[in-house]
Amino acid sequence: MPKTAFGPPVTVLEPDKSVSVLLDVVRRHMHMDVVLLGMWEGDLLVIQVVSGDGVSFGLAPGVTLDLGEEVRSESQTGDTISGDTRYVSDAISRIAEELGIGSYITIRTLDADGQPYGLLSCLAHQPRPRLHERDRAFMVLAVEFLRDEVIDLKRVWEARSRVSRAVCAVLDAGGPTVVFQPIVRLATGAVVGVEALSRFPVQCDDRPCNTEDWFAAAKVVDLGTNLEMAAIHRALRVLPELPAEVTLAVNASPSVVVEGLPGVVCSLPDRGRLVVEITEHENCVACPGFLAAVGCLRDHGVRIAVDDTGAGYSGLDQLLQLRPDIIKVDYVIIRGMDHDPARRTIAVGLVRLTEEIGGTVIAEGIETTAERKAAITAGIPYGQGYLLGKPTASASAACVPYATRTS
């Protein structure tokens, strides 16, 4: 089988609009079918920006090309032009035939250090015998205009490549480490559930620093769903080991609820003890298919919780549309509630709202005995926080009652 010019696709950055505009100008001036800007990533040319009919060549942002050592070396050391690809070297002819190129001009681009960055290329399906030195000079001028944008693209690309490699390393290891924090009945200290929390490497040189940053960064490099699902799969392993009266809560973004969870939940034998916590940091109900996916989860016995209530995006409208089984009151409301009437009033209001929609309330971030007592006074039946139990690697240890741990 002949070697293909195409490599594995990748996710690329959205370029500055000025780059796309300039490529459009170049394409119209040159009367070519397509103009593209590509960047070298190892031996591959990553297509970043395309102007014109890239589809007919099989070219689009994120496509990679393996041009071979001979063509790569030639293009990195100088500019190339051909008005008719019937009269080019065998190495170029192979690529031209596979992509359907009849004529081309390729101009190398350099980074701030004068090192090869990539290529600016004009392609046409038909031969253009009249291509000559003046056309090459025009494209060289375009490259000069692109220099600053190219440098920015490379810097951001390299940063995101480092993030992508770090996330892939976590995925290859089976996903993030999972720890478990107890959720207790405030009046008795009995453990009614555990929440699975993800933990990541803490080095901050080439990677995110905390859990929230890791998931946000993974989303930017198009690995957000993969990372969330890896964490969920790892957490679900402990569900059969938990006491029958203890639930397991996992965190999921609206997009993961739609794309990954329903299929996983269907095969769970203990799905009636699963709670899916959805963060308010996204507009849940605006996500296409979200409410339908939530309905599917509920049909299988899964309970729905809204995380960080009082500190996130949605407000009352989202709560009314979603009608969650559990509302988790964020620590910014719980913290200091024992001596702040305004916080207590908000907490009482959330309790009443939750009762009206048939749900229950969990207070997050309880760290003092006074906050625990204030939460009970406000009518909040359940709580979570360092006072009640710190996250632990052992799900069994997280199930020890609060009263037992403090006696």
Image (cartoon, rainbow, N blue to C red):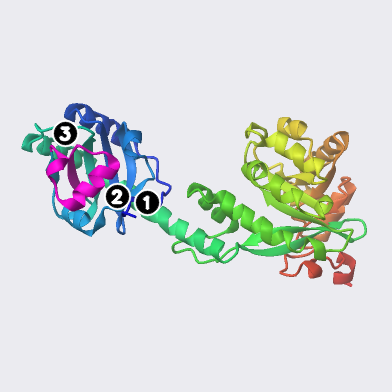
Q: Residue at x 71, y 69 (%)?
A: 393
Is residue 226 covered in magenta? no
Q: Is residue 235 left or right of residue 323?
A: left
Give the alpha-carbon distance from disc 3 to disc 2, as whole Å: 26 Å
Density class for disc 2 (Cα within 10 Å; few <14, some 14-19, many ≥20) is: many
The residue shown at (10%, 38%) is 137
Residue 234 in sight from this viewpoint: yes
Residue located beneath label 3 in the image = 127
Mark 1 or mark 3, whichever is nearer to me: 3
Residues packed near mark 3 inside 10 Å, few (<14), some (14 to 19) or many (20 plus): some
Q: Tell me: 4 left or right of 364.
A: left
Q: Earlier in the sequence, mark 3 or mark 2?
A: 2
Q: Earlier in the sequence, mark 1 or mark 3?
A: 3
Mark 1 → mark 3, Cα distance in angstroms: 34 Å
Q: Position of residue 13 (x, y in %)?
A: 40, 44
Q: Nearer the viewer, mark 1 or mark 2?
A: 2
Tell whether label 2 touches label 1 (CB within 8 Å).
Answer: yes
- What residue is disc 1 on? 157
In this view, the mark in front (3 or 2): 3
Q: CA gap, disc 1 to disc 2?
A: 10 Å
Q: Amino acid at mark 2?
A: Met
- The percent coordinates of residue 343 (x first, y second) are 77, 43
Task: Provide the residue span drawn in magenta.
Answer: 83-109
The residue that mark 2 highlights is 39
Name the foreground residue: 132 vs 2: 2
Q: Quadrant of the N terminus?
A: bottom left
> Is residue 87 located in the magenta-colored stretch of the structure?
yes
